[in-house]
Amino acid sequence: MTAPPVPSRPSPGPAPLHLAVALDGAGWHPAAWREPGARAAELFTAAYWADLVAEAERGLIDFVTFEDSFAPAIRADRVSGRLDAVLTAARVAPLTRHVGLVPTVTATHTEPFHISKAIATLDYVSTGRAGIRIRVSARADEAAHFGRRAFPVPEAELREEAADHVEVVRRLWDSWEDDAEIRDAATGRFVDRHKLHPIDFEGRHFSVRGPSITPRPPQGQPLVTASSGVLPAGSADLVFTTPRSAEEARAGLPDGPAHVFADLVVLLDASPGAAADRLHRLDAAVGRPYGGDADVFTGTPAGLADRLQEWQGAGLTGFRLRPGVLAHDLPAITRGLVPELQRRGAFRTAYGARTLRGLLGLERPANRYAAATS
């Protein structure tokens, strides 16, 4: 049985523009932890992450992503160590009311049954604001933590495995019908066993009978996201891309997902040259220019608003902003960029939906097994 259809992408236009923020350590620049206010001593505390997510919610951000990987530390001058992204999201969920919570999961080394249960639980804890960001890894040093298979593995095989992983997760989310729980104390029936469905998935990478041990999540299907190329068309609700221009954004729009967000690393300051000067200082601290897969924007909130609106015209529906230094650039997004976009009528002035799917204009999907038996 195939995955449920993903809604078609909305027509591009001046509004609404969607925003996500990518949370990683002290920020995306490797020297971020050395900056004033970075709270380097608190990176592994719940309070630190709760404050970041509260700031994002204060700025009416659609959702935050939590980075995660199994990569070991390789440099002593960089932030080393991570908290588990799913558990961190679950910890901060009760402290927020509106912002979506999307932890990263490495499908290459995790079991889909465990992940389906964890994200369904997050959806319950957050009352319908959970999502997942699927990552794959071809790194031998990550595989060495598990010792179950020989690496390297071809990228095509990793992506095939990730597609199966997501298919299993989605089927498990549907394996309980919405009204499977009866909770009838008089008759002693808590659940209708006829509305629990074995998924009987048999594939090259996984063999999973099911059903899940967790009832269907509040959203039915929590949001599935991935970077472009990780999953086949139709597997993800939202895809992240890394264009360097509006032309690249237009040319690289993937088929299938309801939303396509461009990733941008951002360093924002009140004056046009201050952010560039700050980037140069950060680069000097690590001895080389910062570079990565995504474009780097340095400038003012108004200048970034211009960039986002220009790129939105290329067919993007939103942006995932990676703050260079969280202590500085996250508030610059929520208290500088967001008000600027609001003045232009390009961003919401209040949360208008109770679930993450609702914020993104996505319907709650029907249960595939209920439809098959009705």
Image: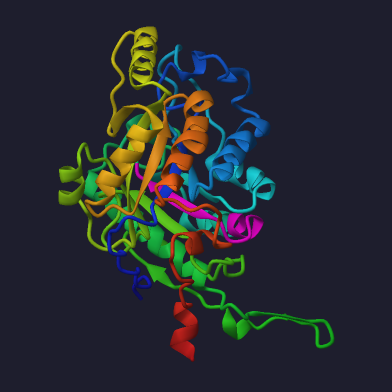
Residue placed farthest to the bottom in the image?
Answer: 374
In reply to whether residue 135 is colored magenta, the answer given is yes
Instruction: Provide the residue span drawn in magenta.
Output: 121-136
Q: Residue at x 50, y 47 (%)?
A: 61
Asked if residue 167 is positioned above or below residue 339 in the image, the reply reads below
In the image: residue 60, left or right of residue 248: right
Residue placed farthest to the right in the image?
Answer: 186
Horizontal and vertical percent for residue 10?
A: 31, 64
In reply to whether residue 269 is colored magenta, the answer given is no
| Residue 30 position by quadrant | top left
**Considering depth in this image, is 369 or 149 the residue closer to the camera?**
369
Q: Could you tell me how many numbered marks the image carries?
A: 0
| Residue 28 position by quadrant | top left
Q: Residue at x 44, y 45 (%)?
A: 343
Q: Residue at x 51, y 67 (%)?
A: 173
| Picture quarter with the N terminus | bottom left
**Considering depth in this image, is 29 or 231 the residue closer to the camera?**
29
**Residue 67 visible here:** no
Horizontal and vertical percent for residue 194?
A: 59, 85
Horizontal and vertical percent for residue 140?
A: 33, 32
Q: Residue at x 40, y 18 (%)?
A: 74
**Residue 252 visible here:** yes
Residue placed farthest to the front in the image?
Answer: 343
